[in-house]
Amino acid sequence: MKVVRFFLLVVTTVSACGVPSYRPDTSRVVNGEEARPYSWPWQVSLESFYPTCGGTLIAPDWVLTAAHCITFHTYRVVLAEHDMNKEEGPEQSIMVAKMFIHPKWNDNCVSCGNDIALLKLERSAVINDKVQPACLPQHGASLSHNQPCYITGWGRLYSGGPRATTLQQALLPVVDYSVCSQSDWWGSSVKTTMVCAGGDNKSACHGDSGGPLNCVGKDGRWYVEGVTSFVDGRGCNTPKKPTVFTRVAFFTPWISEVRETTLNPNINHTGV
């Protein structure tokens, strides 16, 4: 455990994380709009035969995504992506070498939780002004009700609508567990290992899965506090059914164990 705790300290205090060279435009986002190019430099597009999900760069050779996104054997990630229909120049395409799905993930029960996976890249990304990692929250860190966070991705613009071609962002205020777990909200479907955010006309939609819930910390850095997990089956913008994210702060010990295991294969890693 001493090794794991030390490694976690290294991961969460890396000075280069969570400070984009191009500041996100957070002044006028209401129900989603095109993001300023490269202002979310940890956002990745996860692709197999085609773009399937989002993800978050948390280290030069590690990407965080949702377990339910992993359905094929071969993936690549594309960094510094903005317009899916254009080759703009700074993109980096890197194959995924290994995939680690949380051992307690049940693909027949998304509301059971543990919807999280780690991807080890074949090579490290080149960190520059357009590609940078997000910070990981400390284990057990919590978010306050109505705390302003932002979702990013290329998901559908609305239920049944077209997928976005350019990276979108939307303000999703955090909904406290005490509210989100009420019977006329998500009820028992939401767990303390999850984060609710948004609701009404602001939510994730199909294609945003695996991408980050970006929240700025007191230190001014951006943290990936959530991994986009699920929305209501009736539609992306259903009242009292905010987007549900895997709570990254609960899983930071597992993330550290997996990463440490790749450095030392003799260490066994388990779920939390």
Image: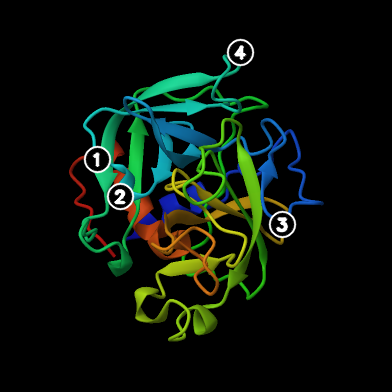
Three-letter code, disc 4: Gly
Gap in Å between the C-alphas at discs 2 and 4? 30 Å
- Indicate which label's residue lies in the foreground, 2 or 3: 2
Three-letter code, disc 2: His
User: Which residue does the numbered mark 1 point to in the structure image?
Assistant: 71
Gap in Å between the C-alphas at discs 2 and 3? 32 Å
Q: Earlier in the sequence, mark 4 or mark 3?
A: 4
Q: Is residue 169 left or right of residue 192?
A: right
Q: Secondary structure at mark 3?
A: loop
Quarter of the figure with residue 198: bottom right
Crowding at dot 3, Cα within 10 Å, few <14 / some 14-19 / many 20+, comes out as few
Quarter of the figure with residue 261: top left
Crowding at dot 4, Cα within 10 Å, few <14 / some 14-19 / many 20+, comes out as few
User: Which residue does the numbered mark 2 point to in the structure image?
Assistant: 68
Q: Earlier in the sequence, mark 2 or mark 3?
A: 2
Three-letter code, disc 3: Asp
Residue in the image at 28% along x and 42% along y: 70
User: Which residue does the numbered mark 3 point to in the structure image?
Assistant: 219
Q: Tag count in the figure?
A: 4
